[in-house]
Amino acid sequence: MASFGVFKLLGFIQPIKDEELPMKFYVPYCVMLPTLSPATGTDGFGNTVDGYAEPLFDTLFGICNPTSEVMDVEVATFNADGTPKPWLTTLTKKFSLASKHGIAFTFIRPNPFTDAPQNFEGYAIVSLSRPGAVNCLLGGGGYFPNYWGTFSAEVPVFADQKLNGMDVNLLSARSSFTYPYSIPYFDDLNHHLARSYRTSLVLTNFDKQDCWAHISFIVDDFYSAFGGAGTKFSTKKQLLAGRSIKGILYDWLQEGGYPPNQNYEGWIQVDLRSGSDESSPIVALSVLPYMLVSDRDFQYFSAATRFF
C-alpha cells in the first residue's frame, strides 16, 4: 500500500500516557504474512525486494480525528489464539492525533511505523479518547510485483458505542448471523483451478464466555436442476473467549457431508450455542464473523460480504 502520503503526518503524532481509553473499535480479522520466497530484483523505487517489505498479505488501518481536540490512540494486536501480538518494543502502539488530522498505516516497516508487528494472523482492538473514525482493509494476494494491487477487501470495524450520531457498526451481544450469499466451491471451464471460487469464514469472540458456532449452508434454488436446492450442510466449531478461528468454508462443510468438488452457491446461518449439541441453549455473545468470497488462492478476486 502506498506510504508516501502518511510521513508528513508524523509531526502530529505524539506518544501518550499509559491509561485506559474510553472508546473501542473491534476489528475481527487482521493479517501480515510475508512472502517467504520473494522474487529477486528491485521494486519501483530501486529497493531490493524483501518478503516483509512486499508481503503476501497485509492490513491497512485508517484513523482520523474529526474533533476539535487532540485524540489519543491505542492499537492492540492479537494472535488468533488470543495472546497479544506485541509491537517491536511495546505491547501496543500508542500515539496522539492533532485535531482534524489522521493517519494510514500497515504492518510493513516503515509504513510509517518502524515497530509494527509482522508475520501473524489474528485481530485488533483500536481504542480512542474521542469519537474518531477507524477503517480497515486487507491487501496483498500476489507475489512481487503484484502485491497489494492484486487483492483487497474491506474488514468491517465495530464500535462499542454510538459516536455523536455517526453511522457506525455497533458491537453487541448476538446469538445468530445470516449471510445471504456464499460460494463454498465452484470450479468449471470458466472458473478453473486458481480462478475457481471459495469462501473463507472468520469467527472472533470478543466476549469472556466460550461458545460453539453452529454453521449451516443452504443451497440456493438455482441448483434445483442439480438436485441440491434447499439442501443443508452443517458443521460446528468451538469458539473460546478472546480467540479467533478461520477456515475455508468448503473444508469445514465437508465435515457435515458437503460433496467433494460440488459446485454450489447458497446462504449461511451461524448460531451460537453453549455446547456442541444441537439442543444446547442459544447464547448471545459479543462475537464477530467475517466472510470473504474469493478465488481459490485469494490472489485475483475478493469481496467481503455483510451479515444480517
Image (cartoon, rainbow, N blue to C red):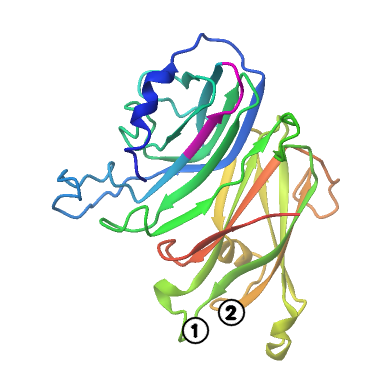
Q: Position of residue 161 (x, y in %)?
A: 74, 29
**Between discs 2 and 1, the one toward the N terminus:** 1
So how many labels did they put on this image? 2
Q: Position of residue 254 (x, y in %)?
A: 60, 68
Q: Which residue is mark 2?
A: 263
Q: Is residue 233 found inside the magenta-colored segment of the image?
A: no
> Which mark is drawn over residue 169?
none
Query: Label 1: how many residues lie within 10 Å, few (<14), some (14-19) or many (20+)?
Result: few
Inspect the image, locate mark 1, and give the three-letter code of the amino acid beneath it. Answer: Asp
Distance from label 2 to label 1 (Cα)? Answer: 8 Å
121 horizontally vs 200: left or right: left
- Foreground residue, 40 or 135? 135
Mark 2 vs 1: CB contact within 8 A: yes
56 horizontally vs 81: left or right: left
Q: Is residue 67 found inside the magenta-colored segment of the image?
A: yes
- Foreground residue, 128 or 193? 128
Q: Residue at position x 66%, y 43% from top?
A: 239
- Foreground residue, 204 or 293? 293
Inspect the image, locate mark 2, and give the three-letter code of the amino acid beneath it. Answer: Asn
Task: Give the SS element for disc 2.
Answer: loop
- Foreground residue, 103 or 222? 103
Magenta residues (range) = 61-69
Q: Residue at position x 42%, y 19% from top?
A: 12
Q: Is residue 64 above or below residue 247?
A: above
Q: Position of residue 241 (x, y in %)?
A: 66, 34
Q: Residue at position x 34%, y 30% from top?
A: 7
Q: Which residue is mark 1?
A: 188
